Every structure is written in C-alpha cells, then in structure tokens.
Image (cartoon, rainbow, N blue to C red):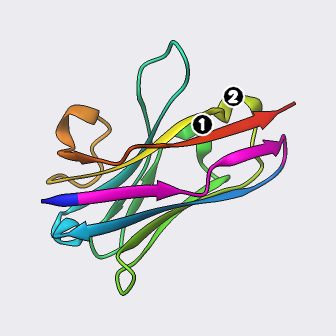
Amino acid sequence: QVNLVESGGGLVQAGGSLRLSCAASGSSFSWPGMAWFRQAPGKEREFVAAIRWDGGRTYYVDSVKGRFTISKDNAKNTVYLQADSLKPEDTAVYYCAVGPIYGSTYSSQYLYWGQGTQVTVSS
C-alpha cells in the first residue's frame, strides 16, 4: 500500500514560484517511476514531470522545461516540484503519482495517486 500526500499549492502572481511537495509512505520509493501530473478545469489530466527512483534521470513536458524542476529526497520519502516563472496557464490541481515505469506520460500507467494540491497563477 502506498499513500501520497501533496502540499505547497497556493495563489501566486505570474512570474512567481511555488515548491510542491509529495510525502510518501509505504513502499512508494521502491517503484521505478514517480511523477507529477496536473489537471485544469475542463481539461484532461496532463503529465508534467517524472523522476527515476534513484533520482538519476528526469523528464519534463515541453511546456515546463527550464521553469520546473523535479527532485526527491529519499531520506524524507518526499518528491518535490519546484515551479518557477509561473504562468496563468499553469493553473491546475497538481497530483503526484507512482508506478512501475519511469518516464511514462500516461496517467493510466501510474498505480497510486495523491489527493492533489491547487495551484492558481494570477495575471
């Protein structure tokens, strides 16, 4: 059993920054893939970033490359998403997820999900 709890969301002006956290319990850190997704109102859930279990590889959707950074602290069982230079189009509920495949952009391939944290970027 894996339990994921996201935090760190909030309201920020365009150009600002937020650091999202995903605290994991259970055997989540033994899974090959951990990722962040986001879902805006009326849109499908979208892949944002992924990190391999050892932190040695990362992968990003083009729209956040150079602005977002995914990282993990195995000692704290926590995955982070540092979001800089935020834009109004980044507004969404952000979810972390774990699964058996590193780097997959398909939400169906992730087995455990957190409850999400809201990020709102004002213009």
Query: What residue would you read off at disc 1?
Result: 63
Specify whether residue 92 is painted magenta.
no
Q: Which amino acid does label 1 sit on?
A: Ser
- For the magenta stretch, what is the residue range? 3-15
Camera-near label (1 vs 2) is 2
Q: What residue type is labelled 2?
A: Glu
From what the image shows, is residue 64 above or below residue 72? above
Label 1–label 2 contact, CB within 8 A: yes
Helix, strand or loop at label 2? It is helix
Question: Any mark on residue 89, and which?
Answer: 2
Helix, strand or loop at label 1? It is helix
Question: Any mark on residue 116, and which?
Answer: none
Quarter holding the N terminus is bottom left
Considering every residue shown, the one lying at the far top of the view is 42
Q: Is residue 5 shown left or right of residue 21?
A: left
Near-viewer residue (37 or 49): 37
Near-viewer residue (27 or 86): 27
Residue at horizontal 84 percent and vertical 40 percent from the top? 14
Near-viewer residue (31 or 59): 31
From what the image shows, is residue 73 above or below residue 64? below
Q: CA separation, marks 1 and 2?
A: 10 Å
- Lower sequence index among marks 1 and 2: 1
**Number of marks:** 2
